[in-house]
């Protein structure tokens, strides 16, 4: 089993920045890909960014390219999402997911085997 705990959400004004963190524990040696997703009320869970477990490859949704950066601290088993130039449309509950199999589209929420409880990000206009 793997446990994921997100932190770092909050309220920020348009143009501001936040840094989200996802701490992974348990059988992390089995993990292949980590991803950040978000879900706004009444909407489906949406891919934001992904990274392979060793941190050598990153993936981004078009809507966040150039504004968000995903990174991994291998020593701490932590995946971070630096979010800059935030917009009101970035408001959502952000979730961290972990995939143990690999070889599947990282932007699909259905490939992820483990999820954290999420953290709320609210961007005011």
Image: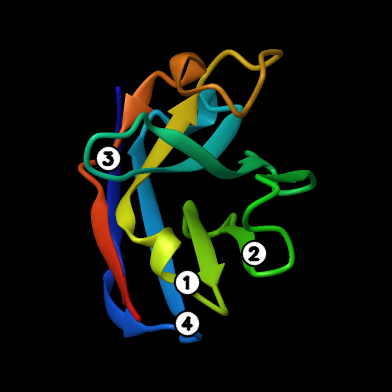
**Separation of residues labelled 1 and 4 (CA atoms):** 10 Å
Disc nearer the start of the sequence (1/3): 1
Q: Secondary structure at mark 4?
A: loop
Badge 2 is on which residue?
Answer: 69
Which label lies toward us, 2 or 3?
2
**Circle 3 or circle 4, nearest the eye:** 4
The residue identified by callout 3 is 116
Task: Measure the C-alpha gap from mark 2 to mark 3.
Answer: 19 Å
- Label 1 packing within 10 angstroms: few (<14), some (14-19), many (20+): some
Secondary structure at badge 2 equals strand
Q: Which residue is mark 4?
A: 17
* SS at mark 1 in the image: loop
Of 25 and 6, the residue lying toward us: 6
User: CB of mark 1 within 8 Å of CB of mark 3?
Assistant: no
Query: Closer to the N terminus: mark 3 or mark 4?
Result: 4
For the residues labelled 2 and 1, the Cα–Cα distance comes to: 15 Å
Label 3 to label 4: alpha-carbon separation: 22 Å
- Which percent across, then down, holds residue 109? 46, 23
CA gap between label 2 and label 4 equals 11 Å
Q: Which residue is mark 1?
A: 87
């Amino acid at each position: 089993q793997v446990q994921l705990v997100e932190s770092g959400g909050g309220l920020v004004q348009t143009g501001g920045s936040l840094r989200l963190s996802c701490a992974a524990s348990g059988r992390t040696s089995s993990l292949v890909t980590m991803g950040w997703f978000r879900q706004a009320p009444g909407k489906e869970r949406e891919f934001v960014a992904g990274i392979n477990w060793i941190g050598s490859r990153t993936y981004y949704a078009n809507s966040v390219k150039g504004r968000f950066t995903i990174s991994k601290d291998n020593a701490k088993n932590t995946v971070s999402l630096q979010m800059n130039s935030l917009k009101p449309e970035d408001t959502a509950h952000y979730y961290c997911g972990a995939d143990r199999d690999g070889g599947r589209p990282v932007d699909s929420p259905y490939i992820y085997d483990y999820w954290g409880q999420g953290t709320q990000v609210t961007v005011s206009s």
